[in-house]
Structures are given as C-alpha cells and as structure tokens.
Image (tube, rainbow, N blue to C red):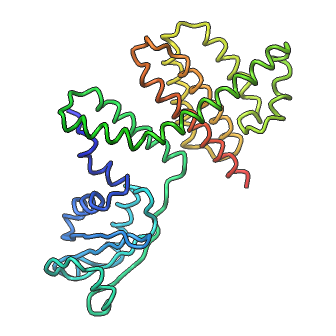
Amino acid sequence: MMVNRINDIAWQARRGSVAAIIQVLNERLANSGVRTRAIFDDGVLQLLCEANTVDELEKSTLVNQVQQILESIAPRNIRRVNINSRIVREQQLLWLEEITREPENQLLWSEEIILEQPNTFQQLIRDFRDRKAELGNSNLPKTQSSRSILINNNSKNLAWRRLLFALSICSFLLLLGWVGYTLLNGKFKHKVLSTTQKSPYPVAKTSKPVNNNQEISQTQDAPKEDIFVEAVRIANQASAAGKVAKSSTQWLEIAANWQRASDLMSQVLPNHSRYKEAQIRTKLYQQYSQAAQQEAEKSKS
C-alpha cells in the first residue's frame, strides 16, 4: 500500500522540515555511531553531531557524509549548514546556546558548508513526481483524519495552484492568438519563421516550432484518446533531452517540446479516464517550458 505523504519522512525533509532532516541523517549515519540534532537559526542549519569516541567524529569523513546526505535530500530554503561535533553528552535543550558561548570547551571542531542547489528544471521534475504521488494517494480509501489532512494541504496549495493556472491560461491564449493570426493570413507554412523571430518568446527563435505546430494540427484530427499518450511521449523526450542539454539552442528546442506536450494535454476531454491527471500535467508542462527558456537564457551568458 502506498504510504500517506504526511508520513513520508523523505518528502517532509525535502520540504525543509528540520525534524525530518534529523531523522534521515540519524538513519543514514547509524552505522557510523553518530547521532545528530539540529536547529534552523538565522538562515543557517546548525547541526550537532555526537558520538562516543573521537574516531567516529573524524572531520573530513563526517563532513563529506553529511554534505552528500543533505544534497541528496535537497531541502528547500536550506543552503548554509554549520556542522558542529562533540563527544556525546546528556540531553541539553539549550545546546546551541552552550556551544555558542563556549565553543572551545564544548566542541571538537566546527565546519560550515554550502549545499549545492538543484537547478530550476530539476526542481520542477521533483515537484511533479511528488504531486503525481499525491494524486495516487488521493485515490486510496481515506479515514476521517486523512481527509482532514488532505483538506489542510489543499488549502495551503490553493494560492500556488491559482498562480499556475493563470500563467498557463495566459501562455496558452497567446500561443493560440499567434497561430490564428498566421493561419488567417494564409502564410503559416512560408512565413512562420520570420514572424517568430520578432516574437519576444525564446521558444520561437528556432525553426523547430514550425514542425511542432504542424504536428499539433495533425494530432487534433486524431482520436482524443490518443492525445494523452502522444503528449506523454513528447514530454518524455523533452525530459530526457533536458538531462544532457548544454547549448541555448538545445534548451529552446526542449522548451518548444514541453509547450507542445502542454497544449496536447489541454485538449484531453473531461470524459477521458485520466482527465484529472491531464489537467495537472498541462500546468506542469507549461512550467517546464518556461524553466527551459530560463536555462536557454543562462546558456547565452
């Protein structure tokens, strides 16, 4: 049975929960004999590592282990981490105050590290996977308690969803207006490249969108049941390309493919068996397209 997301410690750690981060660290450092405590203070995660012997707290080894674990979690809003170490003592609720006041008497050593942050594209991919898992959980039988949790989570995400929806609608309407203008002038096949070169949108700077729009037109004639599968196929290609893309041109092509996938998903009919998922994918694919455009701009500089 799929575990409820509220009990998924790894998911909570990625969201920036200090308690969940401590639990993940303790589980992965258990074989090393190291226990951790942490407090988020003034933009820095203050981490205390304790063990029974000095050897278990060897600086270079422990720092590397902690940094690898935290970067694999990639907790939101946490970039600076100060690692402190000492021989294990009885529980002290004010341990941060103690080591700040007398660091030379309290600590073996202290080291600040900077966590490498995932790029925008990788973060969006991770968010999509989390949301897809949440969608799967919503289909499971729920107790009264889990229903209350789901309602609370939905309320917290309401503003975020509204923003995504507004951005997606605006982008989609702009794209439809551009396509309609070129079609009405009878110059879609011959002058689309020159028209898109004047557009402020990076996606239109290569000749690739010409084929994309033609394929969208062809797909609209196909049965609606095939649109979802076709959109997923295009999205998978864009995702794979995003893992190896380096140049601005490559990122622009990826942005165009994400836009195609988003447009196709928006055409899935309400009676489709995966209509709810299609609506989520429509918004997220649009976000991926925008993220790819940002990566293209970075590659130019």
Is 66 above or below relative to 59? above
Is 251 above or below relative to 211? below
Residue 112 image point, x, y percent: 42, 76
At horizontal 36% and vertical 76% (from top left) the residue drawn is 60
Outermost residue on the left side: it is: 90
Residue 20 image point, x, y percent: 28, 57
Is 217 above or below relative to 248? above
At horizontal 31% and vertical 92% (from top left) the residue drawn is 104
Q: Which corner quadrant holds the N terminus?
A: top left
Is 268 above or below relative to 31? above
270 or 289: nearer the viewer: 270
Tally of marks: 0
At horizontal 29% and vertical 80% (from top left) the residue drawn is 96
At horizontal 56% and vertical 38% (from top left) the residue drawn is 288
Q: Which corner quadrant holds the C terminus?
A: bottom right
- Tell me: 179 left or right of 153: right
* Quadrant of the rendered image containing residue 130: top left
* Quadrant of the rendered image containing residue 65: bottom left
Residue 180 image point, x, y percent: 75, 18
66 or 176: nearer the viewer: 176
- Tell me: 138 left or right of 194: left
Residue 19 image point, x, y percent: 27, 60
